[in-house]
Image (tube, grey):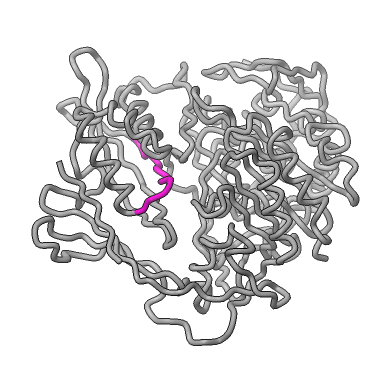
């Protein structure tokens, strides 16, 4: 079956003198990019830390806003940011609709300015093609400043994709085939009818090593007039059909998967949401659930600011370098200005709080006040070295493996301390982060046996793990995750609230662990983590059959 896409036409140092820091082994920093998620973008204020030289910041802001609107499906708004709104709207709608693209993830790079004053912003596009996989490519946005001082995206077909032109367009070709049978860790067959969230995954789990063989297809560049294929841009699925070897074995657990899907169906309230549960001792994934069930796989491929759940990593970095101790006093005021005004959820404050209290109450201002105790790239180094975030994972299905760029200024560094700015993750990553924090060692997550592990990590010191476990537990017994109190077993958790944009409610996060299982859940526009993701995780842990010891 062919589907055509016709694209024509100043804070005092808390706790006294700074402690001596341990040396942290340097690791290679990643490429600096600016992430724009399907739900919009968080942009740090320019403030007094902006450089005098370089492109007009307003040009970059317009580019990021265009990408955010396009990614979120706000095509009319995106089109109005261009020099040809009518044409842009028609082409953008045709491109995503004709190629069955659902919720693209668009990540902007660093703007450059030409001698004539025009500005170019490169970006990476991750286009999820429904039922097949993700098409990834790079393009760039040209911008010009108009007489009224407003920057506009200078509309060209090639900004959508470099090879899109007046003579060539793209065509989606699908090869209809039955998805493979899939079995859970105990050999029980898993069907898309019984487990709707697994439908997009099943087509990606059919071959040896986890390469999909159920659904196959390709995106071709074709001549607009003759339809002749000029080149193949992307292929999906295995090239050969899997021999009849019976159901594909997975690490999933039917009982955990059922509990996860029911928890989302009962408590997500119709909002976009995703959840992952995995085993702490080996990283094997027990459940992957999304709401809506049959759409974009947010759980594994989503790109979100993790908000305050990221304070697990920030706390690890601070403890690793002896920058703070749990009983040190780190004041928690309502506001703290670092280029822009940062605040706590519901404008809470805790004068004279200990760092432990700051963690359990999720105090943004306290964490931001400690930013000078970490080097600019240190948070990313810790994330990569100890938690595997940003390394390439081989899970057995397509995943996004996280990004923690070096902050470009003090405002962004402040934001990174609380999981904002350009820090990006998803439920798979945050479930793994939680598992690593409480066990001390990163295990690459897996959905099928035999996946390649090319990650290189180091274990967290036992003392750091002990502090993390104690603070996660205290967050349940007397902090922001009290919704999980009363559940059997020793549950530890961390809530998170992540800003998206000025015109959208915050995303809600909650990560938790009990026994041998770590869980992470995000609810788009959930406002708070405890209020939106909390009921989902509580339902899961209350109904799951056991902790997969």
The answer to if 105 sits in the magenta stretch is: yes
Answer left or right for 51 relative to 341: left
Q: Give the range drawn in magenta.
A: 100-110
Residue lying at 62% horizontally and 66% vertically, measured from the top left: 446
Q: Is residue 418 visible to the viewer in this orientation of the structure? A: no
In the image, is residue 207 above or below residue 264? below
Q: Looking at the rendering, which quadrant does residue 395 occupy?
A: bottom right
| Front-lying residue, 389 or 279 | 279
Locate residue 192, reporting x and y percent.
Answer: 58, 64
Locate residue 229, reporting x and y percent.
Answer: 17, 66
Answer left or right for 417 relative to 438: left
Answer left or right for 405 relative to 370: left
Residue lying at 48% horizontally and 87% vertically, measured from the top left: 243
Q: Looking at the rendering, which quadrant does residue 351 occupy?
A: top right
Residue lying at 78% horizontally and 29% vertically, measured from the top left: 361
| Front-lying residue, 146 or 440 | 146
Locate residue 354, reporting x and y percent.
Answer: 82, 27
Tally the marks: 0
Quadrant of the image for the N terminus? bottom left
Answer left or right for 381 relative to 313: left
Q: Main secondary structure of the magenta part?
A: loop
Locate residue 190, reporting x and y percent.
Answer: 63, 70
Residue lying at 9% horizontally and 57% vertically, measured from the top left: 225
In the image, is residue 335 above or below residue 200? above
The answer to if 14 sits in the magenta stretch is: no
* Residue ranking furthest to the bottom: 244
Q: Is residue 35 visible to the viewer in this orientation of the structure? A: yes
């Amino acid at each position: 079956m062919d589907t055509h896409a016709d694209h024509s036409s100043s804070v005092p140092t808390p706790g006294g003198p700074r402690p001596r820091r341990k040396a942290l082994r340097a690791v290679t920093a990643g490429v600096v990019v600016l992430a724009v998620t399907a739900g919009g973008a968080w942009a740090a204020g320019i403030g007094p830390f902006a450089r005098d030289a370089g492109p007009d910041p307003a040009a970059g802001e317009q580019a990021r806003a265009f990408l955010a609107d396009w990614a979120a499906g706000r095509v009319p708004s995106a089109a109005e940011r261009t020099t040809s709104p009518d044409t842009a709207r028609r082409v953008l709608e045709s491109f995503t609709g004709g190629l069955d693209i659902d919720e693209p993830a668009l990540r902007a790079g660093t703007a450059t300015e030409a001698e004539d004053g025009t500005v170019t912003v490169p970006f990476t596009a991750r286009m999820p093609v429904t039922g097949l996989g993700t098409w990834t490519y790079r393009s760039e946005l040209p911008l010009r400043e108009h007489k009224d001082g407003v920057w506009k995206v200078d509309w060209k077909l090639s900004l959508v994709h470099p090879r899109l032109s007046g003579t060539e367009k793209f065509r989606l070709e699908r090869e209809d085939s039955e998805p493979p049978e899939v079995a859970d860790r105990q050999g029980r067959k898993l069907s898309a009818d019984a487990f709707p969230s697994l439908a997009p995954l099943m087509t990606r789990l059919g071959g040896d090593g986890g390469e999909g063989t159920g659904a196959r297809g390709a995106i071709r560049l074709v001549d607009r007039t003759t339809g002749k294929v000029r080149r193949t841009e992307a292929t999906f699925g295995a090239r050969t059909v899997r021999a009849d070897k019976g159901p594909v074995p997975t690490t999933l657990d039917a009982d955990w998967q059922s509990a996860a899907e029911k928890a989302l169906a009962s408590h997500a309230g119709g909002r976009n949401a995703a959840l992952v549960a995995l085993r702490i001792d080996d990283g094997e994934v027990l459940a992957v659930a999304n709401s809506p069930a049959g759409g974009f796989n947010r759980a594994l491929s989503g790109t979100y600011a993790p908000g305050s759940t990221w304070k697990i990593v920030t706390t690890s970095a601070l403890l690793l370098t002896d920058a703070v101790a749990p009983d040190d006093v780190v004041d928690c005021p309502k506001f703290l200005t670092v280029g822009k005004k940062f605040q706590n959820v519901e404008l809470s404050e805790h004068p004279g709080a200990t760092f432990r209290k700051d963690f359990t109450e999720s105090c943004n201002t306290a964490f931001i006040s400690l930013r000078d105790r970490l080097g600019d790239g240190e948070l990313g180094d810790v994330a990569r070295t100890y938690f595997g975030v940003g390394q390439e994972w081989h899970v057995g299905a397509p995943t996004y493996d996280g990004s923690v760029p070096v902050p470009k200024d003090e405002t962004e560094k402040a934001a990174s301390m609380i999981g904002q700015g350009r820090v990006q993750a998803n439920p798979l990553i945050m479930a793994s982060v939680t598992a690593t924090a409480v066990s001390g060692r990163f295990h690459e997550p897996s959905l099928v046996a035999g996946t390649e592990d090319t990650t290189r990590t180091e274990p967290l010191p036992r003392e750091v793990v002990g502090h993390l476990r104690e603070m996660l537990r205290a967050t349940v017994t007397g902090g922001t995750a009290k919704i999980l109190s009363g559940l059997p077993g020793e549950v530890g958790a961390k809530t998170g609230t992540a800003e998206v944009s000025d015109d959208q409610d915050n995303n809600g996060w909650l990560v938790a662990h009990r026994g041998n299982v770590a869980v992470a859940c995000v609810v788009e526009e959930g406002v708070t983590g405890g209020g939106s993701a909390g009921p989902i995780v509580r339902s899961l842990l209350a109904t799951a059959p056991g902790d997969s010891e």
